[in-house]
Image (cartoon, rainbow, N blue to C red):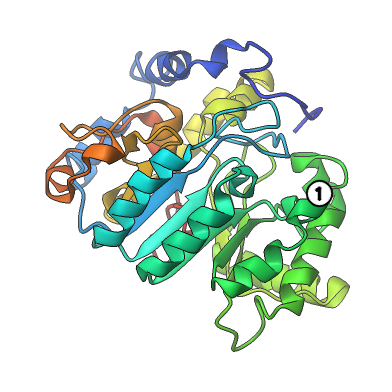
Amino acid sequence: MGKLKTQSLHKRDSDLAQSNRQLEILSNGIFKNGELPTFAKKIKETTNHFPLRPKKLEILQINVGYMCNQVCEHCHVDAGPDRKEIMTWETMEQCLDVIRNTGAHTLDLTGGAPEMNPHFKRFVEEASKAGIKDFIVRSNLTIIRANKKYYDLPDFFKKHNVHVVSSMPHWTRGKTDKQRGEGVFDMSIKALQELNERGYGMPGSDLRLDLVYNPSGAFLPGDQASMEKDFKKALLEDFGIQFHSLFAITNLPIARFLDYLIASENYEDYMYQLVDAYNPAAVENVMCTNTISISWDGYLFDCDFNQMLELPVASKVKHIRDYNEDLLNDRNIVISQHCYGCTAGAGSSCQGTVAE
């Protein structure tokens, strides 16, 4: 993917750090001149899901901050060490009130590196008391080895029965470091081994360890089941590592991945790939239909991607402090051309593929 950047788009003062600039690109050019159909037009013509509406809320996804110890090329959050947006304890308390009273069964903490929020452990401790069925923390793995203050994370995760979902671009050093930075592979392997030692990812273990694969270039992910077999075979043979499932996630054309697509002159070709791979069967189960995404400052979005494009929910309820599940369920989901990424092939969500 070319030379790795070491700063976020915001730090570089890139025009693509502005969500309105990203939306302008996604709305104009090949979509404005009719070369490709807009996502709204596509789902209107091919499904009975227009306008797209929410179903029963199952997942609360909370972004606790954009600070991260990595600056990955494909990152749709544009996270990095220079990002200082961090959820306050006051906002976390508002989230905890909702967690205790919502019908959602899954809590999904993300970032940046969520572990870098200074209130992370306290929040996990309080949230774990709420009786959520599946408590996910999305870890980049390297944070576990980044600093001594994080060395106890595997034990902390085990204590609170946290479901660890970890990014792992490939089972080889070259492809992983190319996407995420020099040394990331070795640190990730060490972190996975430490999680295995605590029982994570082992056969029959209730300590869930899943990996996430994002393509390292301007192409779509392959078959999730086949890749999972390849990952499991290689990681077990080479490093003795085991895990439960692999989630194959399509890179969406926003933030740093959009920057890469434009810089490498792959933007139009990639959008053609997404539209050509559009699968109407994937529309019904896209993650925005059962998820509410909460930003670091407490605002509500249909999904994490809309959050990064600053496309808030189309509801009177805009902030976690005013949370009302009935009102939120009575809304249309906000869409744009980036949504093709979630409906390409077998579909893509934070939980992997969504269609057979």
Q: Which residue is the site of mark 1?
A: 147
Q: Residue at x 32, y 37 (%)?
A: 300
Q: Is residue 12 above or below residue 261?
A: above
Residue 317: which quarter of the image? top left
Answer with left or right where residue 223 lies relative to residue 280. right
Q: Is residue 340 above or below residue 244?
A: above
> What kind of element bears circle 1?
loop
Q: Is residue 245 above or below residue 305?
A: below
Q: Is residue 283 visible?
A: yes
Pick whichever, 173 or 46, lies toward us: 173
Q: Residue at x 62, y 73 (%)?
A: 158
Q: Residue at x 53, y 55 (%)?
A: 122
Q: Which quarter of the image is occupied by the C terminus?
A: bottom left
Q: Position of residue 12 (x, y in %)?
A: 68, 14
Answer with left or right where residue 318 lies relative to residue 31. left
Residue 246: which quarter of the image? bottom right
Q: Amino acid at mark 1?
A: Asn
Pick whichever, 130 or 343, lies toward us: 130
Q: Is residue 282 visible?
A: no
Q: Which quarter of the image is occupied by the N terminus?
A: top right
Q: Position of residue 160 (x, y in %)?
A: 54, 71
